[in-house]
Amino acid sequence: MTLNKKPILSVHNLQVEFPTRKGNLVAVNDISFEVNEGEVLGVVGESGAGKSITGSSIIGLIDPPGRITGGEINFLDQRIDHLSAEEMRTIRGKEIGMVFQDPLTSLNPLYRIGRQLTETIQTHLHLDDKNARLQAINLLAEVGIPSPEIRIDHYPHQFSGGMRQRVVIALALCANPKLIIADEPTTALDVSIQAQVLNLFMDLREQLNLTYLFISHDLSVVEHISNRVQIMYLGRVVESASTEELFKEPNHPYTQALLNEVPRLDLRKRNYTPVSGEIPSPLDPPSGCHFHPRCPHATSKCRNEMPVLKEIAPGRASACFLNESS
Ligand code: SF4
């Protein structure tokens, strides 16, 4: 597939904060990135890195009292971070589809899947009942549900985990969106089913020229699906590179530590230092480089100053003082 170099989504200096009784929690801290049409951007980091909040900000679904306190989000040349809830609802589901980790976030267990699919189709497209049902059956076939004309009348609990996630993907595709935000869409599935669902994502991207923002805590999951990867740590982007470059030569010590967790012999042989300890609380982030308490290369400068995300090669950026001495 040829990629267009036109950004479909651009995020500039995004800041998301949650006021809490213990203080202000900065969940996303001044991050900027673009996703080009037809591209898959993998966003990777541990729980608490801010990757899911980044996804929720784009679709206007941050849980209150969280709110965007800085920056802007543009989708297809339209600024969308200032839209009203109603305006955002038109974009969400129609222009931007969503797939979450738990299919029951998107599916109502009390209704047959056919009702949920046709209602979503008719919310966004002008189709009568008969054609909406036909479209729903076609979508179920497209995502690999066997006997879709029968399965359309089943309830969510009558599907296995993998099949239920396929139904959610069909739901996300109802209005022919251009961008899909997938947040840990395979995390709850068995490993063998994970591979099947990932393959489905890749096939659909080819067939429908989709663009994905693919969020995961697991680098091995994004390796096969992403063109580029952005690593997040405590609300900030610490490294960004093409998937190939990132796996060939990870720059940031945190990326190296994450790669150490990927079960691949060639990576194991490189002996990257594994990450130890827990990600610190964003309510009380460490001074200087937020990664310094866990970094094997930390110096006094790292403890006192914050490294900025800088270009280290064309199309690559990293936020680490080690790049200054090289
Ligand atoms: Fe480690 Fe220092 Fe680089 Fe942070 S700036 S990742 S602490 S070497």
Image (cartoon, helix red, strand yellow):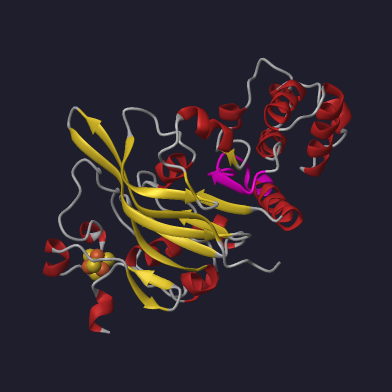
Q: Residue at x 60, y 29 (%)?
A: 106
Question: Magenta segment, which residues?
Answer: 177-193
Q: Is residue 254 above or below residue 124?
A: below
Looking at the image, the residue that sits furthest to the bottom is 326
Q: Is residue 11 shown in magenta?
A: no
Quadrant of the displayed image that contains ligand 1:
bottom left
Name the residue nearer the viewer: 194 or 269: 194
Q: Is residue 183 shown in magenta?
A: yes
Q: Is residue 87 visible?
A: yes
Looking at the image, the residue that sits furthest to the front is 78
Q: Is residue 24 above or below residue 266?
A: above
**174 sits to left or right of 127:** left
Q: Residue at x 69, y 22 (%)?
A: 157
**197 sits to left or right of 179:** right
In percent of width and height, residue 166 lies at 71, 38
Q: Is residue 125 above or below residue 209?
A: above
Q: Is residue 296 visible?
A: no
Residue 100 occupies which quadrant of the picture?
A: top right
Q: Is residue 80 above or below residue 21?
A: below
Q: Residue at x 39, y 30 (%)?
A: 63
Residue 27 occupies which quadrant of the picture?
A: top left
**174 sits to left or right of 4:** right
Name the residue nearer the viewer: 97 or 151: 97
**245 sits to left or right of 195:** left
Quadrant holding the C terminus: bottom left
